[in-house]
Structure formats: structure tokens, C-alpha cells
Image (tube, grey):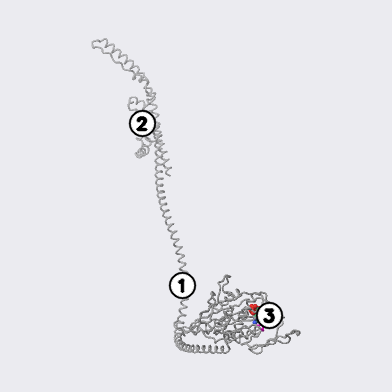
């Protein structure tokens, strides 16, 4: 828009100046004849020369036009490049003498050099006359020349007059044109003013619009911020609404609960009364229970004493015989006769079919033990008899239960058992019993700690079955103190057992580490003596009593004939240690002063159980197979010897505690 206005202005100025130039040109031309006399003024600027012209033009213009003309066009005429051109033309027109109006003779006359007149004395009238005549002639010729010039100039003047007339006409035309142009200019100026106003309004509006835009941007930014805040607030509001909803639900639930609570409160009050009554009753029961507990403890003690008296009467070494039933795979094997005479007596009989031999006829042998377990006896039946010994261990006595017999006669089955709780042998059942009794003992104020260790004697070397590493430290049998005959095994791992489950886990671990091999009578024969040791430490803070006892559960290696054995070295060691056991028993039976306990690791370890104040139970396991008759006889004879041993009376390891 500005650019447009600028161009328009320039156009208007140009028009005006062109008009002015033309006017000046004509005006000069019309005045040229008067100028020759005022040549001194010709060097003045064109503006001075144009003043009368401007004045002449201005005479026909209104005041407003004059003002506009002066304001808008005076400057550009002086300064602009176009004006300077026209100015130079004007100057040229003004300074240059009109070629037609000035006669060249006049110029020649003016250019003639003046000669210095010779001084004539006043008396020389002739000379003076001649001089005057000469002057007259000169003036006369000059007059003639001037006359001719005058005529020429008059002609020129006429011509110029005509030209002036035509210029005057042209000036009028230009004047009119100028007026028209000025009118146009005025209109254009008015329009320009309007447009300028419009432009200002637009500009103002534009600025206003910009301001509004900025304001709008600020508002938009603010709005965005507010929107974000609103979104956060909305999320918070939703959260609060959700919480409000859940609180409302909780409040409703609380309302329900509150009502329920009121009901409960009423019931509670009733119960409170009942509770007080019950409390009084409990107090009464408590005192009754305490007196009953005392009675129970006394009874328990009496029962224990009675049990031990009976056991003493029965003897501290008790022997039971168990006959293994043939397995399905062994159903075709011939059996010798086995007659169970009564609960404690057994008769084995073998009929010799080979009459040609020296030993023809019947071979009949009867044996009496503390009990007989027929092939139909279950694991539970066996443990029922044995459990009194485990009870003795819980009463504070050292107890040893060991299984003896030919390989494959059922020793491991009797001691450890098979899979499933029904098949459990003496060792796991003993442990279950200990843990069951622990609860009863706790009620009577006893706190028990049970520790277990497992070892085996293989080829006269002791191995820790809870240590599976091959490079074990050496284990020796050592005396607990110099006074008694109690022993312990050095470097043996002892695990505290908190439950039957713990114990079963340890037992399975030990079983896996045990030396086994196939024999003629047993696919998985134990080739070592295995000992499970359970140490019981008990303390009764109320009664200020404590005791420790040890339960040794021994699964001896199976005796085997040297002739039939495939592993001679093992068999020699097994048979030698069993023979040492036999010697010890014989020495004890015959009340020898020296009992050769230390001749083998087995007898040394069982020393406290065989000859000390412990209670010992031996299970002699036998097969009924015809081929095993002789071994069975040997086992039964050995068991009879053991049964005839009478150890010193078992002593309880109970001590009174001064301060616990
Ligand atoms: N009373 C029983 N009832 C059923 N099966 C039995 C009984 N006694 C033993 N057996 C089975 O007879 C086989 C041999 O028994 P076991 O391994 O206990 O003999 P062992 O005397 O320990 O032999 P070894 O001295 O060679 O280790 C085993 O398969 C065992 O399960």
C-alpha cells in the first residue's frame, strides 16, 4: 500500500514538473527579445528566472492549489534528478542568447578595440573639424548599421511577438491542463488521504489484530496450561471419585459392620460374663491340672520304675528271634521245619534225606528267647516289643538294639525297613516314638534336644555316613572319661534333629553312603556294621532335673560262610568281628575278669551296651531255607549265649541340677 502511494505521488510530481518545464520554455521564448540588455542576470539560477513565470501561473490558481504546489513540488524541482535536468535546460535557455534575435554585427561592434585618441590642441580648428567629421562619419555609418539592425530586430520582434502569442495560447492550454492535473492531483491526494486514513485504520486494526493475536496466543498458552491443570485435576478428581466411591462402599460396609458390632458388643458383654465365669473355672481347672500333673508325673515315674524293674527282671540283655518269610522269588527253595513251641521258644528241624551219610536222621534243635517273631509278624509287631527299650532311652538309660544274623536273613529290613510307613523298621519308628513322647514330656516340663549320627565299620575302619566325601578324617573310639566305660567316636558328624522328617532324610542319606554288595542270599547285602546313634539331652527346669541318654541302633553285617563268599576280604573282617563279639559275650557269660572289648571296633563301640549299665536288645534274624540251616543254627546258638549273659543292673543317667 505504501509503495503504491509513493509511486502515485511521484507520478503526480512528474506531471507537474513536465508542465512547468513546458511553460517555462514558452515563457522564456516569449521574453527572449527583451533579454539582451539584461545579460548580467543570465548567470542566475533557473529558479530566479522561473519566479515570474510561477507567479504568472500562480495568479490563476487558488490558495490551496498554490500551497499544495509549493509544498509538494517545490523541493523535487530543486533537488530531484529530473528537475535538475529541466533546471539546466531553463538555465541554458536563459543564459544562451536567442540565436535569431541578437544580430551578430552588434556583437562585432562591441568587440572592436577602442583606439587612444591623439590630443589636438584647441587652436587647431581644422584638426578638430576633421576629427569631428571623422566622428560624424563613424556615427553616421553606425547609425546606418543600427537602422538596418533595427529593421532586422523589428522583424524579429514581430516574429517573436507572434511566437509569444502562440506561447500565450499554449500557456493557456497548459494552464488549463495544469488545472486539470491539479484537480486530478487533488482528487488523487484526497483519495490518497482517504487511503492513508484507510491505511492508518488498517494499520491500527492490524496492530490491534497483532495485539489481539498476541493476547490470543497468551490466552491460548494460558488455556493450554489450564487444560493440562484441568486434566491433572480431572485425573485427581477421578481418583478422588474412585476413592470416594470405595470409601462410600467402605462406609456402607462399616455401617453394616457397626450394626453387626453392636450386636457383637451385646454378645461380647454376655461372653465377658461367661469368660469371667470360665476364667474362674479355668483357674480351678488349672490348679486341678497342676495337682493332676503332679499325680501324672508321680505315676509316670512309678510306671517307669515298674517298667525298668520288669526289664531288670527280664534281664538287661534281651534276645528276640525273627524268622524271615521267603520272598516270591524264593518260593521254590526247600525249607527246613520250624516249629514255634510258644511265644518264646522255637524248634528247628532238618530231615537228612541222605541215609548213606554219617549224619542221617533228624536234626532237631530248640531255642528259647525273650520273644519269637514268626514270618507273619509285621514291623509294627516287632516294634511293639522293642518300644519299651526306646522308652527306656527316653527315661534316661543308654540303650542298644542290634540285629544279628546270616546274610539275607532280614536284619536291614528289621532295623531300617522298606518303603512306606507300614514298612518302617525299628530305627524310623523309634524316632517317631521319641518325637511323640517329646510332646508328652514337654507337658511335664521337659525340654529335649535330639542329635543323630550315622557310622559304619567296614573292614575294621570307621566311616561317617553323614559325610559323603571320600577323604574323611580318621575316626577313633575314645573313652568319654577315665571313670566309666562310656565311649564316643572322634570326628563324627552330629546333626540336631527337630522332626521325624529331618531324621528320615538323614537316614536315607546314610543308607546311600553305606557299603553294599551282592551275596548268594542277598542281592543288596550290607557289607558293614552300621550304627545309628541318637543322643537325647533332656532338662526339666521345674523339677531341676536333667539327663542324657544314647540309643544305639545297630545293623550288623551278615555272617557268611567263607566257602561261599565271593568277597573274601570283606567276609573275613565281618566274620572276625562277629567272632570277637561272640568272645566278648562268652567272657561276659563266664564272668571273666578281662573282657576283650578292644579286639574289634564293633565290640569296642558296643562296650557300654554289652557290659555296662545299658539295656541291650538283640534281634537274631534267621532264614527258613534248607540251605541256610547250619548258619541258622549258628546264629541261634550265638543268640542263646547272648541271652544267657547278665550284665550289671542298668543305671539311669539322671542328675539333679543345682542351677539351670
Ligand atoms: N520280614 C520280612 N518280610 C518281608 N520281606 C523281608 C523280611 N525280612 C527281609 N525281607 C526281604 O529280604 C531281603 C533281604 O533282607 P535284608 O537285606 O534285610 O537282609 P540282611 O540280613 O540285612 O542281609 P545282609 O546282611 O546281606 O545285608 C530283602 O529284600 C528284604 O526286603
Give the quadrant of the N terminus: top left
Between label 3 and label 2, give the one nearer the viewer. 3
As helix, strand or loop, the secondary structure at mark 3 comes to loop
Q: Secondary structure at mark 1?
A: helix
Residue on which disc 1 sits: 247
Q: Secondary structure at mark 2?
A: helix
Q: Is residue 160 above or below residue 332?
A: above
Name the front one of labels 3 and 1: 3
Q: CA distance from mark 1 to mark 2?
A: 103 Å
**Residue at the far left in the pictured view:** 123
Left or right? Give the position of 148 relative to 391: left
Task: Name the residue nearer the viewer: 318 or 133.
Answer: 318
> Of label 1 and label 2, which has the lower sequence position?
2
The quadrant in which residue 595 appears is bottom right
The residue that label 2 is drawn on is 46
Q: Is mark 3 within 8 Å of ligand 1?
A: yes
Q: Which mark is residue 194?
A: none
- State left or right for residue 532 relative to residue 135: right
User: Upstream in the sequence, badge 3 or badge 2?
Assistant: 2
Q: Which mark is residue 327?
A: 3
Using the numbered discs, state the Cα–Cα distance from disc 3 to disc 1 in whole angstroms: 73 Å
Q: Say few, some or many: other residues with alpha carbon within 10 Å of mark 2 (under 14 / 14 to 19 / 20 or more).
A: many
Q: Nearer the viewer, mark 1 or mark 2?
A: 1
Q: Where residue 654 sits in the image (x, y, percent)?
A: 50, 84
Q: Nearer the viewer, residue 236 or 558?
A: 558
Q: Are marks 1 and 2 in contact (CB under 8 Å)?
A: no
Q: Does 624 appear in magenta?
A: yes
Residue 219, percent across and down?
A: 42, 57
The magenta region covers 622-633
Amino acid at each position: 500500500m505504501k509503495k503504491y502511494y509513493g509511486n502515485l505521488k511521484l507520478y503526480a510530481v512528474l506531471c507537474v514538473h513536465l508542465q512547468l518545464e513546458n511553460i517555462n520554455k514558452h515563457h522564456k521564448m516569449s521574453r527572449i527579445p527583451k533579454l539582451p540588455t539584461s545579460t548580467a542576470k543570465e548567470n542566475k539560477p533557473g529558479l530566479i528566472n522561473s519566479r515570474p513565470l510561477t507567479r504568472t501561473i500562480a495568479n490563476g490558481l487558488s490558495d490551496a492549489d498554490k500551497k499544495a504546489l509549493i509544498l509538494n513540488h517545490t523541493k523535487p524541482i530543486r533537488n530531484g534528478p529530473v528537475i535538475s535536468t529541466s533546471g539546466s535546460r531553463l538555465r541554458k535557455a536563459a543564459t544562451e542568447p536567442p540565436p535569431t534575435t541578437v544580430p551578430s554585427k552588434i556583437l562585432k561592434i562591441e568587440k572592436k578595440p577602442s583606439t587612444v585618441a591623439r590630443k589636438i590642441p584647441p587652436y587647431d580648428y581644422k584638426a578638430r573639424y576633421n576629427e569631428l567629421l571623422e566622428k560624424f562619419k563613424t556615427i553616421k555609418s553606425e547609425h546606418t548599421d543600427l537602422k538596418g539592425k533595427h529593421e532586422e530586430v523589428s522583424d524579429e520582434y514581430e516574429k517573436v511577438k507572434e511566437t509569444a502569442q502562440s506561447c500565450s495560447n499554449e500557456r493557456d492550454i497548459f494552464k488549463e491542463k495544469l488545472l486539470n492535473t491539479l484537480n486530478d492531483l487533488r482528487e488523487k491526494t484526497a483519495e490518497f488521504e482517504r487511503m492513508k486514513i484507510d491505511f492508518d485504520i488498517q494499520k491500527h486494526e492490524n496492530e490491534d489484530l497483532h495485539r489481539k493475536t498476541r493476547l490470543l496466543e497468551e490466552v491460548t498458552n494460558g488455556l493450554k496450561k489450564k487444560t493440562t491443570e484441568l486434566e491433572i485435576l480431572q485425573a485427581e478428581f477421578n481418583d478422588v471419585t474412585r476413592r470416594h466411591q470405595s470409601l462410600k462402599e467402605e462406609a456402607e460396609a462399616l455401617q453394616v459392620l457397626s450394626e453387626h458390632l453392636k450386636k457383637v458388643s451385646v454378645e461380647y458383654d454376655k461372653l465377658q460374663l461367661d469368660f469371667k465365669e470360665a476364667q474362674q473355672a479355668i483357674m480351678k481347672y488349672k490348679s486341678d491340672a497342676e495337682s493332676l500333673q503332679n499325680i501324672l508325673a508321680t505315676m509316670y515315674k512309678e510306671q517307669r520304675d515298674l517298667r525298668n524293674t520288669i526289664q531288670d527282671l527280664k534281664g538287661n540283655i534281651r534276645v528276640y528271634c525273627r524268622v524271615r518269610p521267603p520272598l516270591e522269588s524264593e518260593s521254590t527253595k526247600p525249607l527246613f521245619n520250624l516249629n514255634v513251641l510258644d511265644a518264646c521258644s522255637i524248634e528247628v528241624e532238618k530231615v537228612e534225606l541222605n541215609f548213606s551219610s554219617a549224619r542221617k536222621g533228624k536234626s532237631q534243635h530248640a531255642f528259647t528267647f525273650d520273644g519269637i517273631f514268626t514270618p507273619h509278624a509285621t514291623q509294627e509287631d516287632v516294634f511293639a516289643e522293642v518300644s519299651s527299650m526306646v522308652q527306656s532311652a527316653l527315661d534316661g538309660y543308654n540303650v542298644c538294639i542290634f540285629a544279628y544274623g546270616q546274610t539275607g536273613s532280614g536284619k536291614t529290613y528289621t532295623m531300617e525297613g522298606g518303603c512306606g510307613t507300614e514298612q518302617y523298621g525299628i530305627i524310623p519308628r523309634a524316632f517317631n516314638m521319641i518325637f511323640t513322647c517329646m510332646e508328652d514330656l514337654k507337658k511335664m516340663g521337659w525340654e529335649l534336644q535330639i542329635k543323630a549320627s550315622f557310622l559304619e565299620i567296614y573292614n575294621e575302619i570307621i566311616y561317617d555316613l553323614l559325610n559323603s566325601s571320600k577323604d574323611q578324617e580318621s575316626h577313633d573310639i575314645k573313652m568319654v572319661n577315665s571313670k566309666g566305660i562310656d565311649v564316643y567316636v572322634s570326628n563324627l558328624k552330629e546333626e540336631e534333629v527337630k522332626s521325624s522328617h529331618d531324621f528320615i532324610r538323614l537316614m536315607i542319606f546314610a543308607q546311600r553312603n553305606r557299603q553294599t554288595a551282592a551275596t548268594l542270599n542277598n542281592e543288596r547285602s550290607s557289607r558293614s556294621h552300621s550304627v545309628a546313634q541318637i543322643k537325647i539331652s533332656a532338662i526339666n527346669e521345674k523339677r531341676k532335673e536333667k539327663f542324657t541318654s544314647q540309643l544305639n541302633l545297630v545293623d550288623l553285617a551278615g555272617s557268611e560262610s567263607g566257602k561261599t563268599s565271593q568277597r573274601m576280604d570283606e567276609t573275613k573282617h565281618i566274620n572276625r568281628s562277629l567272632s570277637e563279639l561272640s568272645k566278648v559275650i562268652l567272657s561276659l557269660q563266664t564272668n571273666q575278669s578281662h573282657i576283650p572289648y578292644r579286639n574289634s571296633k564293633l565290640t569296642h563301640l558296643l562296650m557300654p551296651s554289652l557290659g555296662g549299665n545299658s539295656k541291650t536288645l538283640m534281634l537274631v534274624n534267621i532264614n527258613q531255607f534248607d540251605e541256610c540251616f547250619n548258619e541258622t543254627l549258628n546264629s541261634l546258638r550265638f543268640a542263646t549265649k547272648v541271652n544267657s549273659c547278665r550284665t550289671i543292673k542298668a543305671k539311669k543317667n539322671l542328675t539333679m541340677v543345682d542351677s539351670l
